[in-house]
Image (tube, rainbow, N blue to C red):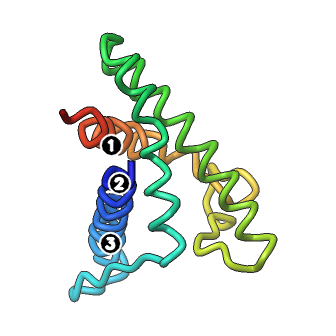
Amino acid sequence: MKRKFLQCGMFGWCIEILYTGLRSLKKDNHTLTGHTSIWMFPIYGMACLFSPICRRIQHFPAFVRGCFYTVCIFFTEYTTGSLLRHFHACPWNYSHARFQIRGLIRLDYAPLWFFTGLFFEKILCRH
């Protein structure tokens, strides 16, 4: 479990830095500077808790699994964001976005979370 936690945390950090680095092009930042927060490591690492579930739903179609992971990620993002916001430590604020809920989740990120969940599944279901 410890190894899976570390793998999920590192994978999450890497995809977040890659994503924010590529998004910096929209701001005409050609250095492709990406960023994340220390808080994100344990949040991404918590994906390891879904290891038993991943194994049980592997036979479902990828679309169903991806939708399930998307809902789980939204729930986790909302819950951890609410907790961190209470301590003035939430590293994200989506208040400016059109399809946001309380500034904590962005519904337009659903496709990103869909595929991220399926990638996490690959990490968690490796033998």
Q: Amino acid at mark 1?
A: Phe
Q: Is residue 75 above or below residue 39?
A: above
Where is residue 27, by image quadrant? bottom left
Along the viewing direction, whichever of 18 and 126 lies nearer the viewer: 126
Image depth: mark 3 or mark 2 in front: 2
The quadrant where residue 15 appears: bottom left
Mark 3: amino acid: Ile
Tell me residue 28's x, y (percent): 30, 84
User: In the figure, is residue 16 to the left or right of 99?
Assistant: left
Q: Residue 113, image x and y in percent?
A: 43, 44
Label 1 or label 3, whichever comes before in sequence order: 3
Does 26 sit left or right of 82 as displayed? left
**In contact (CB < 8 Å): disc 1 and disc 2:** yes
- Give the camera-side residue of 114 and 23: 114
Which residue, given by chain and number where applicable, does mark 2 sit on? 8
Q: Residue at x 60, y 48 (%)?
A: 76
Q: Tag 3's secondary structure? A: helix
The residue tagged 3 is 17
Residue 19 percent location from the top left of the image: 32, 65
Residue at 34% in and 60% down:
6
